[in-house]
Amino acid sequence: MEKMSRVTTALSGSALTGRTMHCHLDAPANAISVCRDAAQVVVAGRSIFKIYAIEEEQFVEKLNLRVGRKPSLNLSCADVVWHQMDENLLATAATNGVVVTWNLGRPSRNKQDQLFTEHKRTVNKVCFHPTEAHVLLSGSQDGFMKCFDLRRKDSVSTFSGQSESVRDVQFSIRDYFTFASTFENGNVQLWDIRRPDRCERMFTAHNGPVFCCDWHPEDRGWLATGGRDKMVKVWDMTTHRAKEMHCVQTIASVARVKWRPECRHHLATCSMMVDHNIYVWDVRRPFVPAAMFEEHRDVTTGIAWRHPHDPSFLLSGSKDSTLCQHLFRDASQPVERANPEGLCYGLFGDLAFAAKESLVAAESGRKPYTGDRRHPIFFKRKLDPAEPFSGLASSALSVFETESGGGSMSWFVDTAERYALAGRPLAELCDHNAKVARELGRNQVAQTWTMLRIIYCSPGLVSSANLNHSVGKGSSCGLPLMNSFNLKDMGPGLGSETRLDRSKGDTRSDTALLDSSATLITNEDNEETEGSDVPADYLLGDVEGEEDELYPLDTEHVHPEEPEYVLPQEAFPLRHEIVDTPSGPEHLQDKADSPHVSGNEADTASLAPVDSSSSLLSVSHALYDSRLPPDFFSVLVRDMLHFYAEQGDVQMAVSVLIVLGERVRKDIDEQTQEHWYTSYIDLLQRFCLWNVSNEVVKLSTSRAVSCLNQASTTLHVNCSHCKRPMSSRGWVCDRCHRCASMCAVCHHVVKGLFVWCQGCSHGGHLQHIMKWLEGSSHCPAGCGHLCEYS
């Protein structure tokens, strides 16, 4: 959609007028270039080579340079440039490796002037010297750059980058003899046209091919480069070593970069694929574009500012077969749609909050930030009205710091390092983690681990140390409590044969037999109780006194004169009504209904008689003989995990997920699990707990998380002899043709684990190097470096 804004710019007595407009081309464009008076633009591509006049309301076709009966590859253009000193001189780079110059002043229809056929592959870029009318520079896919004098038929100089293909070449505007070249291996080279034998400077600018570069029109040493790594970097070339001044992160590979006239920190970029828009960036604010043009519907292939002293008009060509003129005033500003609010927690609990200045009152007791520990702390930087972003969206930043010592996260680090998540039975994992939490003063977490142990493990294996109560005076371990019986005058034979050997912690197998079929007098209302206020009547086990007797716990209500009650020797069935014996004392009947047996204390010993005339005491399972299955507690465990996660303790949620595994995984959706895992891994990496983080990823029950540590890793290796980077896949250097994996001790090729010194690059077999460094700290290769193995 065309926008109707118009701009008039005065330039040296003439005026540039126009609006945002576009015209349809016959074919996709590969490059565009503007003549020096900003009145015409040339568009070149594989099937198009035309000149258009830029009028106030539209583009008007002036000349078609593709003439002739037969189509020629010389007319298939990859790049085009219009000389800024001679308005009749153009040059094109052909896809067949030919460099062609065009003279618009020729009277014939065919404007072709000269052909240079010295390149063997596609020519990617051509560039005229800014002040020398007859000097033309080209860069080709064959890795060579050639300098042509248009008064001669052959090139005058050939520059070899000793590298892969050349993607861009640009003469410096300020330095007469200097030009820059970019390569597909990520390097940028600076050359002096008087010295074609070697480059003046070379440095690695990007991680991947460098597709474009552009010298700053005002600052002598600023060079902007764009590459496949989606970055635009600004380099200061006036220093001894190239210094990166600014870096802009884009969303796609950068195909073209052009500095904006009259705006020192602005540059325009377009992408090679995916993104069809053109962006204008302020390199001082690299995260949000200053302007964006969205007219094209396919990849933008060429951009050019209409006049070197006019920042208002930008021309572009695209693969959608359109030529556009963009008015900067009509550009959209992404900063207007940016969210000015933000919230972030610091590593040690500090909270930063940013909001629109209009929403944050200037008063409300704000205190200036002085760097000391203040709770809370606010600070705000006042913007200078002269700054370029003063009129754009800006936010006020508030920082809340935690009290000194109150935000310590040492417990998090200690817990992460000491927790056991795998490699042991579930019961041991729960016990160990409960112990760790208890030692760190996190009693609620410790209790949670204990409850998980009780729920998912056999009750007979629960250690008494993890139970909340103890039973009996002087008892060292929890024992099952039973309903009341009063046995007196037991025969010596029975007493001696049924004694429980508690000093050894087990039941003598020759006298006490486990009888699962035996039952105990109980009632249907018995439940598992913990910490009951009703005391147990009798206790069997380690208590003070003789081991042969049953001692009453209620010493105030002992009735020594009450009649004896003896069980029949053939025992009795479950809940069988005893009719031959009188009813027990009232205080015993009242307390017989009291439940005292914990579900975790299930199995007890049965006493078997030796003599048939002796009385029988049968002690069986506790008050019930079945326990609730773990699935009964699934909802409770799920709610517990959500509780810890909502409280911010994602460490506990993830640890329980890993320890319980499939027992609880099915109850929590995959997206929630992934969110917990990624949050916990991020915290671990913030605290540099790399090993713990990797273990959590490895043990993860989420498929999306378990593959995080399976991503490929790139290892850059230098040759230990020539110190150059090794580009081949093998261990033989392409430059010095020597094996880089030779052991410095045994001088054999290392075919297994290889260790090397990061200081001198020498190394060898791991065992050989370790043994060598035990007796000497000098490098075994004899380079004199002091190596250290840790």
Image (cartoon, rainbow, N blue to C red):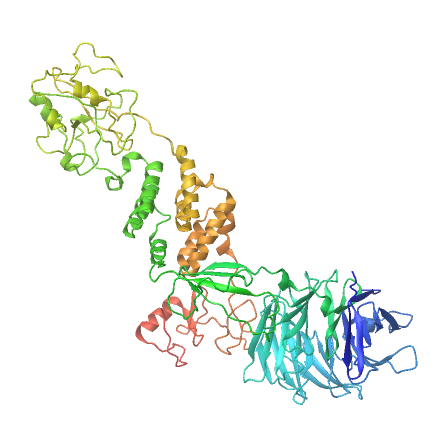
Left or right of 453 on screen, residue 503? left
* Residue at the extreme bottom of the image, as rendered: 194
Left or right of 648 on screen, residue 522? left
Residue 414 lies in what quarter of the image?
Answer: bottom left
Of residues 152 and 485, the one nearer the viewer is: 485
* Residue 483 at x, y percent in the picture: 21, 24
Q: Quadrant of the C terminus?
A: bottom left
* Residue at the extreme top of the image, as rendered: 580
Residue 611 lies in what quarter of the image?
Answer: top left
Q: Is residue 763 above or below residue 480?
A: below
Q: Please give the name of the residue rendered at 30% of the width and 20% of the height, measured from the top-left corner.
A: 524
* Residue 525 at x, y percent in the picture: 30, 22
Left or right of 339 on screen, residue 487? left
Viewer can see residue 98: no
* Residue 378 at x, y percent in the picture: 45, 65
Q: Quadrant of the N terminus?
A: bottom right
Viewer can see residue 97: yes
* Residue 649 at x, y percent in the picture: 40, 50
Left or right of 81 on screen, residue 488? left
Residue 781 lies in what quarter of the image?
Answer: bottom left
Q: Please give the name of the residue rendered at 59% of the width and 65% of the height, measured from the top-left corner.
A: 393
Of residues 573 and 337, the one nearer the viewer is: 337
Q: Is residue 198 above or below residue 693?
A: below
